[in-house]
Amino acid sequence: MTSSDSDRRPPPGGLVWFDEPAPPRRTEQLSRERIVRAAMDMADQEASGEFTMRALATGLGVRSPMALYRYVGSKDGLLDLMADQVYGQFAVARGEGWREALRTMGRTGWDAVRRHPWFARLAFSRPPLGPNALDLYEAALTELDPLGLDAAIRSRCVDTVLGQVFSSGLALLEERTMRARTGLSTDDDLEQAAAPYMERIAAAGRHPHFVRWATDPERHAPGPQPFDQTLEWLLDGLARIVAEGGRTPGA
């Protein structure tokens, strides 16, 4: 080991993008790509999206997690690589106007989060500095550029849509974790378990509007998916701001 190797410090926060040496040459058993793919598969299969490096190493047929760290730097580094793979599943419509650009980003992002709910947690905890994340922001900001909005408003337009994707994904992850913990795997299971409690709520008479809503079959009527409907409401609000040249209406 050279003196420069021994003096090397871990990147701040374990971020794999900060001064992280290239991984060693891939072997028949290990490569950065194979480790990331196996970690994503393991996280997909766990309701909570959690996994340990030891379990990952065992799944890859190696004795120690240390063998993996040579390729990804640390577990945080691996999480960065996993998150960036999911950012690569987002898309931004090009040349069709800012609204379609953000709509496409939102819908493809929601599809990606439903495939990989654990990503929503990483989106709030790991900075989006990987190549796919930067490409995503670049594409979205490019489509907003002709509007002439200031930098803060452009970033808020992007972050408003991404925030809806991430928060919806986090809710999905927590619900999936709850269902696995309680064994209430379907909506019918949940409704049956809650039925005695709801009967007591109705009998108490303190929450008539909630009870009327909860027992109204129309609340399940066919229509736009909740995420798509909320996304359109957000885009309607952003359209007003765009029309005002970046000023919040009523400010």
Image (spheres, rainbow, N blue to C red):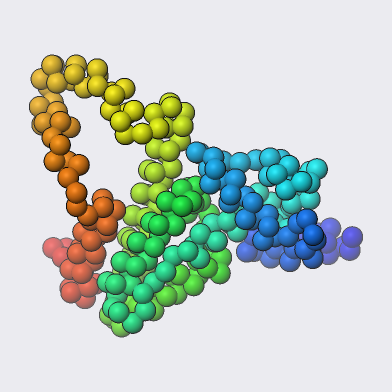
The residue that appears at 43% across and 53% down in the rendered structure is: 113
* Residue 121, percent from left and from top: 48, 47
Q: Position of residue 72 (x, y in %)?
A: 69, 56
The residue located at (83%, 64%) in the rendering is 4
Q: Quadrant of residue 32?
A: bottom right
Residue 105 visible from this viewpoint? yes
State the residue at coordinates (73%, 42%). 58
- Which one is in front, 21 or 175? 175
- Seen in the image, is 45 located left or right of residue 9? left
- Identify which residue is drawn at 10% across, 20% down: 205
**Would residue 45 appear left or right of 145 to someone viewing this image?**
right
Query: Looking at the image, can residue 210 be seen?
Result: no
Instruction: Work out whether residue 50 or residue 62 is closer to the camera in this orientation and state it.
Output: 62
Q: In the rendered view, does 13 fall on the left or right side of 154?
A: right
- Judge whether 154 appears above or below 216 on screen: below
In the picture, which quadrant includes the N terminus?
Answer: bottom right
Residue 6 lies, in percent from the top left, at 84, 58
Q: Which quadrant of the view contains residue 77?
A: bottom right
